[in-house]
Image: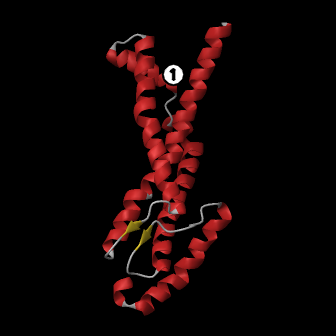
Amino acid sequence: MAAAGPHSLAWANQFVSPLIDSLHFIGYGIVKPFMDGPLPPLFYRNITGIGVLGALAYHVVTILWLFINKPAVIITPKIALQRLMDKKGWGPVRAWFALEGVLLFLVIPFGAWFTAMLLNGIHGWIVFHVKDLLTPIFTVMLFLFPGAFILAIWITVFEHLVYDLSQAVQFIFRV
């Protein structure tokens, strides 16, 4: 669109800008785009908003999918521990430490990184300077679309935390 001239860019902004402005009503509004370059700032704001809208749409689909298919989608920590013990032949303590190690050293850091990337896309703390038309598209895909997975990641972390706390309470009080 931008390569076709300023008229086509203005035409696209006329349809995309109201959609991106509506993100402010749900708390996902673009405060400052995380890119700038030779095109008008509204272009970078709109393309960032499209990426945030895609991540938000994926969050909605994740929530709907979990409500419809919860038993088939989420493997509870108890089942994961049992499968790990059966598959590897480990005891419960070693399987628990392995599962918690993956959670602490892989899942939580990736969740934090993806969350930071999505928040940077909304607030523009770190700004990337682009020089052509394709770089903003790849930058949005690289830095905003991983933010679509944060809901699933944090649900998994929360589920493990609740399971660990319930097991600790049972151990302490022998319930």
Find residue 52 and report its horizontal and vertical position in percent: 51, 62
Residue closest to the eye, 138 or 126:
126
Can you see residue 38?
A: yes
Image point (50%, 73%), residue name: 45
Residue 65 vs 126, above or below: the answer is above
Q: How is the image coloured?
A: secondary structure
Q: Quadrant of the N terminus?
A: bottom left
Question: Outermost residue, top direction?
Answer: 174
106 horizontally vs 155: left or right:
left
Numbered disc 1: secondary structure: helix
Q: Amino acid at mark 1?
A: Lys
Q: Which of the 4 quarters of the picture holds residue 84? A: top left
Find residue 88 and report its horizontal and vertical position in percent: 33, 17
Residue closest to the eye, 89 or 139:
139
Q: Can you identify the residue that label 1 sits on?
A: 78
Can you see residue 1?
A: no
154 horizontally vs 86: left or right:
right
Residue 167 vs 119, above or below: the answer is above
Image point (66%, 61%), residue name: 26
Residue 6 vs 64, above or below: the answer is below
88 horizontally vs 31: left or right:
left
Find residue 65 and report its horizontal and vertical position in percent: 54, 47
